[in-house]
Structure formats: C-alpha cells, structure tokens
Image (cartoon, grey):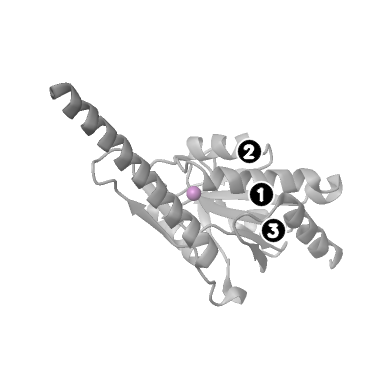
C-alpha cells in the first residue's frame, strides 16, 4: 500500500511538471502568435545595455548596420533557441556582403540570471556574429519598452527555476536604427533572409 502511495505521488509530481511545462509553452507561444503590435512606426530607439565583455553599448554603436533584434532569456527551453537559430540560419543564407553588414542581437529579459558573460556566450553559440546584451533591470526594461516587448517573471508554485513569459518577435531595423518590419514566431530562415535582401535592395 505504501509503495502504491509513493508510486502515485511520484506520478502526480510528474504530471504536475508536465502541466507546468505545457502551460508555460502555451503562454510563450500565445504571446508570439496572438499579441498585436501597436504603433509599429515607433518600435525601437536608443538603448543602453551591456555586452558579453561587460562593456556598455548603445544603439549608436550599431549605426550603419541593419539589425535583427530578438528579446528572450537564456533559460528558455524552446522558443528562444528556435528563433535565434532561425536568425543564425537566415544570416548564413545571405550573400556574404549583405551578411557582413547585418548585426544579429539577442537582448535578455532576464538580467537577474543572464550576466554579461552568460548572455555573450549564449548568443555566440548561435552565430559567431551574434551579440548578446544584458543590463541593469532598468536598462533592460527601457530597451524592452522601446521595442514594445512584454515580459514577466513566472515563479513556479513549488519553487525552483522561474520562467520568463515574453513576447517573441524578431525585429528588422535599418542602419539608422529605424523599424523596418517584424517576423512572427515560426518565420523560416528563408523568409527572414528574403526580407533582409528586399530591404538591402531598396538601399
Ligand atoms: Ni523564450
């Protein structure tokens, strides 16, 4: 009987974890697929953040380079890695002269865990040219607000690792840091590369 109870409670624990993961995925995906962006023309703008080397960087440091910008967090189990891989693959699909001008940028919404070193190494794992940025909670909030990015910490009921719910869009910004367009979650590397090319050709 005792064994059965242990067995059942273990099963319940596994089920609870499965439900939590599922709920998280629905939240993460829901943000990306159903949220609407208001005031697209005003997306982006100046930011002050910290790079993987611990140096302060601002939007001005990327002047002249169109940017592919994504906000997320390094503990993200699925959505962020998928989207960052799509950015990396898109860059590799571009002709070398265009690819060299595009600056992929990952900005964390979890500065508490994503230190400069963590975020820099994480971004570099997706693409050697991808820059990972973090900052003080205030700096991150300012950057996220500029891009109309929603994020919120989600503490698990039973303790343990927290998750970050966040909207999931890839932003294409021009060389002057102005918004060009965004890509919904699940946009393929081919579609992203084609849009970057279309933008590059209007220049
Ligand atoms: Ni994520």
Which residue is labeled 1 in the image?
104
Q: CA distance from mark 1 to mark 3?
A: 13 Å
In this orientation, which residue lies closer to the viewer: 39 or 131?
39
Label 2 secondary element: helix
Query: Percent from the top left, x then y, of residue 177?
Result: 66, 64
| Observer able to see residue 87 | yes
Which element carries disc 3, helix, strand or loop?
loop
Spatial CA span between label 2 and label 3: 23 Å
Disc marking residue 63: 3
Q: Residue 158, position in %: x, y?
A: 23, 41
Kind of element beneath mark 1: strand
Within 10 Å of disc 3 (Cα), the crowding (few <14, some 14-19, many 20+) is few
Occupied quadrant, residue 44: bottom right
The residue sitting at the top extreme is 3
Sequence-wise first label, 1 or 2: 1
Asked if disc 1 and disc 2 are in contact, CB closer than 8 Å, the reply is yes
Q: Nearer the viewer, mark 2 or mark 3?
A: 2
Residue marked by disc 2: 126
């Amino acid at each position: 009987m005792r064994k059965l109870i242990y067995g059942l409670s273990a099963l319940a624990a596994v089920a609870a974890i499965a439900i939590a993961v599922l709920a998280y995925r629905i939240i993460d995906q829901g943000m990306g697929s159903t949220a609407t962006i208001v005031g697209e023309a005003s997306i982006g703008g100046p930011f002050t953040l910290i790079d993987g080397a611990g140096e302060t960087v601002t939007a001005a440091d990327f002047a002249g380079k169109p940017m592919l910008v994504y906000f997320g967090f390094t503990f993200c189990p699925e959505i962020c890695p998928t989207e960052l891989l799509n950015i990396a693959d898109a860059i590799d699909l571009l002709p070398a002269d265009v690819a060299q001008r595009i600056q992929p940028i990952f900005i964390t919404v979890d500065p508490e865990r994503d230190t400069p070193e963590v975020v820099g190494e994480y971004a570099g794992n997706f693409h050697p040219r991808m820059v990972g940025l973090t900052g003080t909670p205030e700096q991150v909030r300012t950057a996220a607000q500029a891009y109309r990015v929603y994020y919120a910490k989600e503490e698990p009921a039973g303790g343990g690792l927290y998750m970050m719910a966040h909207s999931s869009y890839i932003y294409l910004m021009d060389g002057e840091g102005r918004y060009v367009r965004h890509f919904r979650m699940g946009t393929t590397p081919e579609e992203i590369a084609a849009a970057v090319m279309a933008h590059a050709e209007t220049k």
